[in-house]
Image (tube, helix red, strand yellow):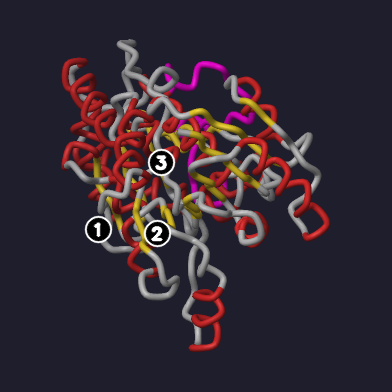
């Protein structure tokens, strides 16, 4: 089988991550893949490192349709997979008999009849729409005029796996990801003060919050000032803004992973990475995050930082996770691999590409 992946995404975003994982998943199925992405984009470098054949391009607008058509004729793909609007539109002009699978990883908003009609017209040449979650798939069904399939992002379990390392004496919570207001760092820090109060009430080791991420619209200084405002001592938290190479080790060592986002999160990469390392997760209920908790041992969801009882939910999961054995952690990692690995993603894609019904 020949699969041509077309990616107009300019940034190293969650959609780019999904495209790379999908290509790896198809490679596991024995597919010959060709990647056409934007030249000199971050994802181009990642595809090169991963060993994929590339024919990059400087754009996907009408002026590049003839070039795309020439690549299509030369490669003769059985399946074309697109990850954005420009390349999906372009594929209309050269798709031929290839099966067109369009990934949709953005949230959808309520639309009027004209917008729904426009969306359906834009998908007349699409055979299948992929989404990263069941919730998004349900929102698109009926609006695109083709089958809609939910396929969860697959994480490379050779990079994210359980490491049997000594955990800290104090229970540690980790928020991992860029420092950005939408990620909810400040809101969770305020919630953390309530978790500390519960810890003081019940006794035992006092929890510690770790934050690791590069600044993006939010600075380390701003978070430190916020910590002072809400009464957190320097001993209660640590903020690190460095790139690290041992992510799996870090995720394996902490007691609990935290995804505190205020929005988005349709592709739940970080939550899945924690679980593949054997570490349970607590997360807000935005986007697709609630779908991560397909097994009770994976952790818990709380509606928002202001929800009454949110601190107690997190405190209970944290207390239990801090006392876990390595055997329990390894068991969780294996369960997560069955749900969120590249191998699991490849099996889901096999059913869809071969024409099986995997609609959710």
Residue 116 against residue 169 in the figure, above or below: below
Residue 208 showing in the rendered view:
no
- Categorize mark 1 by other alpha carbons within 10 Å: few (<14), some (14-19), many (20+): few
For residue 205, side relative to residue 174 (left or right): left
Q: Which mark is drawn over residue 10?
A: none
| Residue sitting nearer the eye, 61 or 198 | 61
- Secondary element at tag 2: loop
Foreground residue, 164 or 168? 164
Cβ–Cβ below 8 Å for labels 1 and 2?
A: no
Q: Residues within 10 Å of mark 2 (few under 14, many from 20)?
A: some
Q: Is residue 150 left or right of residue 239?
A: left
Q: Report the quarter where the C terminus lies.
A: bottom left
Mark 2, residue position: 286
Q: Quarter of the image holding residue 56? A: top right
* SS category of the residue bearing label 1: loop
Query: Residue 300 at x, y = what percent?
Result: 25, 47
Out of 116 and 74, give the one closest to the viewer.
Answer: 74
What whole-number distance in Å separates the C-alpha atoms at marks 3 and 1? 30 Å
Q: Based on the displayed image, in which of its 4 quarters is residue 35 positioned?
A: top right
Q: Is residue 176 above or below residue 114?
A: above
Span of residues in magenta: 227-250
Q: What residue is disc 1 on?
A: 309
State the image coordinates of residue 206 (x, y, percent, origin top left): 32, 31
Q: Is residue 240 magenta?
A: yes
Q: Which label sits on residue 153?
A: 3
Q: Position of residue 292 (x, y in %)?
A: 30, 46
Foreground pick, 286 / 323: 286
From the image, state whether disc 3 or disc 1 is nearer to you.
Answer: 3
Which sits earlier in the primary sequence, circle 3 or circle 1? 3
- Is residue 116 visible to us here? yes
Q: Nearer the viewer, mark 3 or mark 2?
A: 3
């Amino acid at each position: 089988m020949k699969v041509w992946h077309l990616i107009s995404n300019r940034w190293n975003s969650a959609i780019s991550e999904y495209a790379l994982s999908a290509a790896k998943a198809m490679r596991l199925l024995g597919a010959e893949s060709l990647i056409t992405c934007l030249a000199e984009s971050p994802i181009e470098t990642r595809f090169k490192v991963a060993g994929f054949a590339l024919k990059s391009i400087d754009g996907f607008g009408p002026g590049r349709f003839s070039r795309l058509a020439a690549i299509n004729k030369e490669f003769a793909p059985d399946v074309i997979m697109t990850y954005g609007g420009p390349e999906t539109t372009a594929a209309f002009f050269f798709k031929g008999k290839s099966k067109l699978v369009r990934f949709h990883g953005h949230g959808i908003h309520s639309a009027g009849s004209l917008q729904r009609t426009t969306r359906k017209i834009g998908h007349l040449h699409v055979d299948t729409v992929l989404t990263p979650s069941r919730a998004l798939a349900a929102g698109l069904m009926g609006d695109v005029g083709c089958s809609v399939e939910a396929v969860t992002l697959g994480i490379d379990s050779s990079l994210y796996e359980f490491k049997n390392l000594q955990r800290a004496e104090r229970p540690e919570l980790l928020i991992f990801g860029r420092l950005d207001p939408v990620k909810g760092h400040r809101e969770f820090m305020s919630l953390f003060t309530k978790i500390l109060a519960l810890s003081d009430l019940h006794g035992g080791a006092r929890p510690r919050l770790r934050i690791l991420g590069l600044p993006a619209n939010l600075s380390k200084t701003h978070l430190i000032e916020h910590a002072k405002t809400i009464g957190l001592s320097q001993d209660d938290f640590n903020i690190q803004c460095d790139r690290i190479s041992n992510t799996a080790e870090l995720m394996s060592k902490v007691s609990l992973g935290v995804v505190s986002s205020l929005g988005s999160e349709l592709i739940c990469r970080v939550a899945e990475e924690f679980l593949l390392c054997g570490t349970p997760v607590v997360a807000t209920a935005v986007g697709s995050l609630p779908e991560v908790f397909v097994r009770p041992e994976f952790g818990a969801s709380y509606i928002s930082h202001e929800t009454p009882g949110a601190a107690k939910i997190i405190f209970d999961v944290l207390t239990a996770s801090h006392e876990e054995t390595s055997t329990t952690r390894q068991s969780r990692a294996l369960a997560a691999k069955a749900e969120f690995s590249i191998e699991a993603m490849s099996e889901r894609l096999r059913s869809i590409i071969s024409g099986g019904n995997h609609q959710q």
